[in-house]
Image (spheres, rainbow, N blue to C red):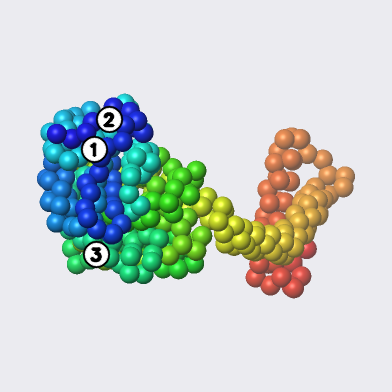
């Protein structure tokens, strides 16, 4: 049976110990309505962890699931289950698990079977060999099942993140990564409760000169229904990247914005000087022609019977003259107008 904690941060669960000097690892898995996929994932993880010599623990955070996720997890051995009484978000679940973790290394992965958890110790090995602060499983392998509808937004977010971080980021929001607990906890005040948790920690660590490495991994089709809302979450990601940029590297945001405003001001200045001034001259000329046309059409001393007909004829004559004037100016601005 798993250890069940109804409220986070209450009772410590006993992790698995091994007679080794290797750093222990806590596997943290957020879950929301994952009853169909989480069982095989946890069984595989338990088998993998038991084959290693390092201490470990597996922590599942049931983030207010409305299905049988908690019951499935509770029936499995050697799992610590923490339950949120309501759905608080992907990031909130991860923060609960990281706070609860008892080992210096943290691995996060998903409960839906999309990530190749058998590659976990490749990430751990690289982190220890390079003395990295975080190693991310980048979804750039030969088999990557990312829905087509999400790829354009993912590409744009990646380009924006590369600019903010000042380096190429193979996968900014992969949910499969290993990091040092103490390094990530320094950013807890900035980490959001939603899906942008991984984006925030990636940019935060990179712009703060932490060492982040990447390992290429495959990405499988998920079991069950995705919780991601493409349009809303994409807009949130863009807003988040800009906010992180303003916090860590403000010049990278303010400098392009200032240059853009400067260019717009120059364009407006040129437009107002060349175009609006010419339009003002045309308006003045149109008024003069309208008056001349009126005097030519109704000579002094001539009488007419209908004042309304007189005014209508004046307007028509003036419009014809004005149109001729404008056409002449457009064709040969330096030529004297024929209407004059």
Residue 5 is tagged as: 2
Which comes sooner in the sequence, label 2 or label 1? 2
Residue shown at the point (43%, 65%) measured from the top left: 211
Nearest the viewer among 47 and 54 is 54
Q: Which residue is mark 3?
A: 122
Residue shown at the point (46%, 62%) measured from the top left: 210
Crowding at dot 2, Cα within 10 Å, few <14 / some 14-19 / many 20+, comes out as some
Residue shown at the point (46%, 58%) measured from the top left: 205
Query: Mark 1: which secondary structure?
Result: strand
Residue 111 is tagged as: none
The image quadrant that residue 70 belongs to is top left
Which comes sooner in the sequence, label 1 or label 3? 1
The answer to whether residue 182 is seen in the rendering is yes
Residue shown at the point (87%, 47%) measured from the top left: 300
Residue 80 is tagged as: 1
Which comes sooner in the sequence, label 3 or label 2? 2
Question: Which quadrant is the N terminus positioned in?
Answer: top left
């Amino acid at each position: 049976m798993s250890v069940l904690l109804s409220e986070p941060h209450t009772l410590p669960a006993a992790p698995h110990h091994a007679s080794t000097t290797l750093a222990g690892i806590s596997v943290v898995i957020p879950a929301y309505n994952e009853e169909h996929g989480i069982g095989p994932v946890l069984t595989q993880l338990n088998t993998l962890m038991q084959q290693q010599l390092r201490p470990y623990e597996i922590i599942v955070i049931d983030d207010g699931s409305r299905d049988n996720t908690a019951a499935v997890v509770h029936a499995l051995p050697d799992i610590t289950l923490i339950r949120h009484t309501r759905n608080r978000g992907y990031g909130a679940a991860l923060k609960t698990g990281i706070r609860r973790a008892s080992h210096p290394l943290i691995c996060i992965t998903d409960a839906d079977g999309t990530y190749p958890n058998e590659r976990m110790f490749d990430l751990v090995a690289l982190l220890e060999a390079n003395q990295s602060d975080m190693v991310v499983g980048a979804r750039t392998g030969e088999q990557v099942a990312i829905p087509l509808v999400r790829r354009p937004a993912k590409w744009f977010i990646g380009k924006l993140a590369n600019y903010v971080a000042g380096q190429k980021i193979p996968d900014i929001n992969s949910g499969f990564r290993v990091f040092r607990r103490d390094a990530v906890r320094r950013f807890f005040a900035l980490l959001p409760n939603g899906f942008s948790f991984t984006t925030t920690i990636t940019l935060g660590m990179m712009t703060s000169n932490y060492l982040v490495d990447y390992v290429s991994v495959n990405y499988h089709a998920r079991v069950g229904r995705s919780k991601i809302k493409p349009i809303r979450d994409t807009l949130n990601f863009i807003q988040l990247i800009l906010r992180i940029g303003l916090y860590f590297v403000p010049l990278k945001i303010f400098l392009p914005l200032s240059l853009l405003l400067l260019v717009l001001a120059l364009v407006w200045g040129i437009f107002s000087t060349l175009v609006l001034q010419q339009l003002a001259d045309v308006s003045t000329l149109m008024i003069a022609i309208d008056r001349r046309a009126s005097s030519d059409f109704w000579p002094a001393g001539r009488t007419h019977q209908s004042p309304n007909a007189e005014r209508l004829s004046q307007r028509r004559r003036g419009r014809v003259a004005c149109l001729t004037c404008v056409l002449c100016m457009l064709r040969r601005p330096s030529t004297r107008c024929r209407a004059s």
